[in-house]
Amino acid sequence: MSLFLKETSFGESSCLGSIFKCYLFPISSIAEFNEAIEKIKKENHKARHIPYSYILKESGKCSDDGEPSLSAGKPTLDFLNSKSLKDCACVIARYYGGKDLGVGRLRNYFLYSLEDAFNKAKFIEKKLFYFLKISTDYETYSIISRLAKSSKFLI
């Protein structure tokens, strides 16, 4: 089973004056992602960092965009994977609040903003099905039928 976003969702968190604005949205191509992140960067031109993660088809990519290593991109990519999300992107604009948060707190608040967006999102669930056409005699059909039922396959 895989989850796909129906539409863009927005989430936010804040800590010690820093504000984390998360955009969680469906994508169908890298070009579409690049267009969306450029728009987000323009809208949030005063943000200090804009890390991202995305999953397209079966592969994912992430960037910390200058944040300490493994504080933003990888944790958000891991979150998307843990929720079985496909063909989606997470972009988080962080506005610096004047106080250093440390890697652990940074990671937590990036994830809090993503969780907020995820909890507000609407999804489409898709299940993978394989269709097989088998021509056989009746005796073999009964064997195949029993095996399929015991393995929860549909006939």
Image (cartoon, helix red, strand yellow):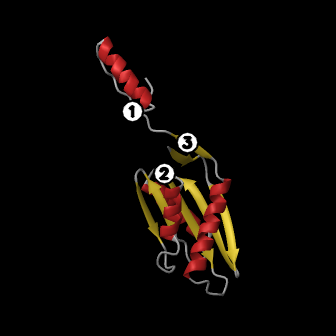
Q: Residue at x 45, y 26 (%)?
A: 154
Q: Looking at the image, is mark 1 or mark 2 nearer the viewer?
A: 1
| Amino acid type assigned to the residue bearing label 2 in the image | Asp
Horizontal placement of 116 versus 73: left or right?
right
- Answer above or below: position of 26 versus 152: below
Instruction: Look at mark 3 in the image and give the residue it sits on.
Output: 125
Mark 1 to mark 3 CA distance (whole Å): 17 Å
Image quarter where the C terminus lies is top left
Instruction: Look at mark 2 in the image and give the residue it sits on.
Output: 87
Q: Residue at x 58, y 84 (%)?
A: 102
Instruction: Look at mark 1 in the image and give the residue it sits on.
Output: 130
Disc 3 element: strand
Q: Quadrant of residue 152?
A: top left
Q: Which callout, 1 or 3, points at the residue further toward the start of the chain?
A: 3
Q: Is residue 130 visible?
A: yes
Q: Are marks 1 and 2 in contact (CB under 8 Å)?
A: no
In the image, residue 111 lies at what x, y percent?
Answer: 59, 67
